[in-house]
Amino acid sequence: MPIEPGCKVFVSVGATFSKDGILRPAWLEWEDGTRYKIERIKHCERAASLKAGGIGYRYTCLICGQEHFLYYDDADGKWFVERK
């Protein structure tokens, strides 16, 4: 299945590292400049984005009461989400 162009949206993310070295995103900023708080991180795993392409860490996040995937591509240090 070909990857749809434009379905990967790079976003700015505010994140912290715990004293154990664990990376935890706290908020993300969408294309229009709106900042969304990450209410909860439900899960984090190494995974590929099948819709947008790319591999890295996939955070299953609760944002505005809805579940979303946030990806951190550790090869280039960029954060992205899949456009719905």
Image: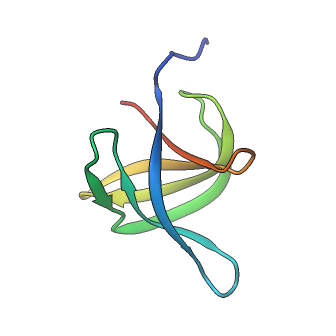
In the picture, which quadrant includes the C terminus? top left
**Residue 82: percent from left, percent from top:** 46, 35
**Residue 47: percent from left, percent from top:** 67, 45
Picture layout, residue 31 above or below residue 17: above
Picture layout, residue 26 above or below residue 36: below
Relative to 52, is 13 on the left or the right? left
Determine the residue positioned at 51% across, 68% down: 15
Determine the residue positioned at 45% across, 45% down: 11
**Residue 46: percent from left, percent from top:** 69, 52
Please identify the residue farthest to the top as the structure is shown.
Answer: 2
Relative to 61, is 35 on the left or the right? left
Picture layout, residue 8 above or below residue 80: above
Determine the residue positioned at 60% across, 36% down: 49
Residue 63, picture quadrant: bottom left
Determine the residue positioned at 70% across, 44% down: 76
What is the tally of numbered marks visible in this picture? 0
